[in-house]
Amino acid sequence: MPDLKLYDPFTNMQFTDENCFLCGTTITKEHRTPVFGEWMQDKYNLRNKELLMLDKSVTTFDQLTIPCCDQCHLNHVLPLESEIEDAAKTEYDGICTLDQKRIFQWIGKMYYGMLVTELIKEKDPLIMPENPVSENPQMLGKFKTFYQVLQSLRVPMKFSDFLPCSVFILQVAPTEDDLPFEYQDELTTMCFSIKLGPVVIVCKLLDNGIIRNVLNRLYKLTEDRELHPIQVAEFKARVFYAAYIFNVVPDYFIRPGKPEDEQLILDSLIDDITNEVFNPFEPLAYAHMLEEMLKPWSIREKDILENPQKPISFLTDDNGEFKTIKQFAK
């Protein structure tokens, strides 16, 4: 019989190098698993590339590992990484064939790996972050809810009529694309993007697909098209900004089961009665987000908000139709 008991490290803030990140088993400091799969580190030459943490310490992709017992590493983490690696071999077509639940688990594992690393570092930081994650009860509540569904990686779990995230898969045109790998995450808004060669995956965790529905028309315009990198940057800005103004947290409920059950079934509820799902759209705040994404092209806020009520777009024209960009002159 499969183990259907969920692990909760948040109640006692059990974030140490001696507890498996996925099941909580007591382990030694030698039991680790990479946050970013070794296949990815090798393929994109990431091992010695540096990452800046919230406490201003510097690590590398190779050093960025999290505590993981042998059973979870061998039975859950490695098979997931192998599945993504195989799909990535055929680039966009391969990634698109993946079960989106597996994409959620893969993105979620990396996102949570970064979070666990930050929580462990906060116990002995180089410089204490201005807003420590471990001292924000609201954020910890969101992370606890997210961790409940992330355990679908270890515990057989069926989501009844939802996916706990919004996933977007974009294809990059090769003409002016000279960036083989890129990764961005935002811990507080739970947004994540990763570029694997000509494929970009953008994901907002813990929204039950709401942002995917909101951006569905735009996403449909991009499907099976090769986007110029500046268009990818704008798409990312739209998702990251939607995550920024997203204002609700789903609740997840395990259906009552029987002793012979071989999986948990989760239902979900979002309180959209007492809370607005999104805070109001603010052009200036969106412009700041877009400006950050457009840094490689030196496009500034004044250019983005030339028309204050309609920020500049490289994805769509004035009629809302897809805008084809082969080359972009800075």
Image: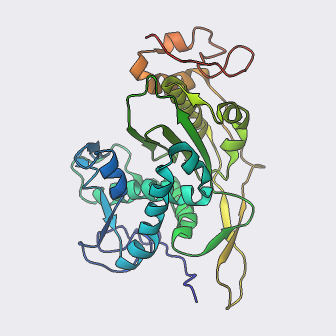
Residue closest to the eye, 151 or 323? 323
Horizontal arrangement in the rendering, residue 62 relative to residue 98 (left or right):
left
Horizontal and vertical percent for residue 308?
62, 12
When asked about the image quadrant of residue 122, the answer is bottom left
- Its colouring scheme is rainbow
Q: Residue furthest front?
A: 90
The reply to whether residue 227 is visible in this rendering is yes
Compared with 158, 327 (above or below) is above
Give me the residue at 56% from left, 85% from top: 2
Residue 146 lies, with reference to residue 197, above or below; the image says: below
Give percent across and percent down for residue 7: 49, 75
For image coordinates 21% across by 49% down, the residue present is: 126
User: In the displayed structure, would residue 138 be above or below residue 257?
Assistant: above
In the image, taking residue 317 as reference, residue 142 lies left or right, namely left
Q: Position of residue 281 (x, y in %)?
A: 65, 28
Quarter-wise, where is residue 148 in the image? Answer: bottom right
Q: Nearer the viewer, residue 320 or 18?
A: 320
Query: Which image quarter is the N terminus in?
Result: bottom right
Q: Residue at x 71, y 38 (%)?
A: 214
Q: Nearer the viewer, residue 183 or 267?
A: 183
